[in-house]
Image: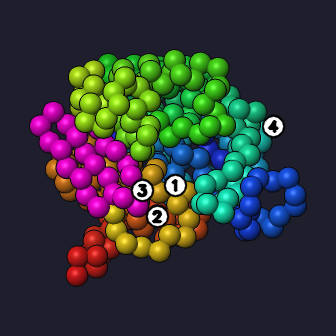
Amino acid sequence: MHKIVTIGEILVEIVATERGDGFRQATPLIGPFPSGAPAIFIDQAGKLGQPCAIISRVGGDDFGTVNLERLKGDGVDISGIEVDPLATTGSAFVRYRPDGSRAFVFNIRDSACGKITLDSRATRLVSECGHIHVMGSSLYAPSVVDSILEAIRIVKAGAGTVSFDPNLRPEILESPGMREALLTVLAETDVFLPSGEELFLFTEARTESEAVAELLATGVKAVVVKRGAEGASYFDASTSLTLPSFSVEEIDPTGAGDCFGATFVTFWLNGASPREALEFATASGARAVMHFGPMEGASTRAELEIFLTEQKA
C-alpha cells in the first residue's frame, strides 16, 4: 500500500456554543477538539487502515497531547511530529453565524506549527511515502511552504503522486507568498480536490466544464469537486460523473471535506474505480457532519459500508 504523508498545522478547536458573529463579547465555549485540516485528513486515512504519517509540531501542553493521542490511536504514524516544550500548540476559536458560516480566530503562525521544518528525520519519513497530500491552509509560513515543496520533490522523484485541496480560509489567503505557493503546488498535482468556487481559482474559465478541461490540460489527472449537501463530481480525461449527497442530520460540518478527501485519496490510491472512490468519499463526508467536532465523525471502512447499505435499503 502507498503510504500517505501530509505536512501542516495541528491545532485544537474551541467552539462557541451560541451562534453569533465573532468573539467581541464573552460567550460559552466547548472543546478542545483535535483539529487542523491536514490532521483531520490524515486521521481519517488512518481510520481506514491506510498507512499514513504527518509532519508537524505541537507544544508540550495538553492541547498537543490531545492531538497526539487521537492520531496515534487512529493508526497515524506520528514520528514526524516534533514536541516543543517551550512552544504552544496551535488553536482555532470558531463561532457559527446564524446563516451557518463560520468566524475564526486562529493562532497558527505564532504557534509550534508555525515553525515546521523538514529536518533529517522528517526527510527520511517522506522518502518512505509514495503520496503526499497538500492542504492550501498549510501554506501559511515560509518554512512550512519550503518543507511542503521539498517533500513534493522527494515524493515525485520516487514516482509518487500528489493530491491538493485548496481549503482556503479568508483569514490566511493574503499570507505572504500564499498565491505563488498555491500555483507551485498545483503544477505538481495529480488529484485536485476543490470545493465549489475554488475550482475557478486557478483558471481563466467561466464555466465548470471549461475549468475542468483547463486543469486537465495542465497535467492534473483527476479533478474532484466537493459540493457539500449537493454531492460531488469526478472528472478525468475519459470519465465524468456526479453523485448526490446523502440525507443526514447535520450537526457540525467542520472537517467533512477533509474526511471526504482522505477517503477519496485512499480508495484512489488502492485501485478503486472513480465511482466507488467517490461513493465512499461522499459517505465519509456525510457521516462526518453527523458528529460535533472536526475529527469526531471520522469513519472506519466497516462503518462506511454499513452506512451505504442502510442508505440504499
Q: Which residue is mark 4?
A: 86
Camera-near label (1 vs 3) is 3
Q: Which residue is mark 1?
A: 255
Q: Residue at x 64, y 33 (%)?
A: 172
Relative to residue 219, is residue 197 drawn left or right?
right
Label 1–label 3 contact, CB within 8 A: no
78 or 295: nearer the viewer: 295
Residue segment shown in magenta: 223-244
Mark 1 vs mark 3: which is more N-terminal?
3
Mark 1 vs mark 4: which is more N-terminal?
4
Image: 298 above or below 7:
below
Q: Amino acid at mark 4?
A: Leu
> What is the secondary structure assignment of the residue under circle 3?
helix
Q: How many neighbours does mark 4 have within 10 angstroms: few (below 14), some (14-19), or many (20 or more)?
A: few
Is residue 169 shown in magenta? no
Mark 2 vs mark 4: which is more N-terminal?
4
Q: Amino acid at mark 1?
A: Gly
Which quadrant of the rendered structure holds the N terminus?
A: top left
Alpha-carbon span between mark 2 and mark 3: 11 Å
Label 2–label 1 contact, CB within 8 A: yes
Q: Which residue is mark 2?
A: 288
Alpha-carbon span between mark 2 and mark 4: 34 Å
24 or 288: nearer the viewer: 24
Camera-near label (1 vs 4) is 1
Q: Which residue is mark 3?
A: 228
Camera-near label (2 vs 3) is 3
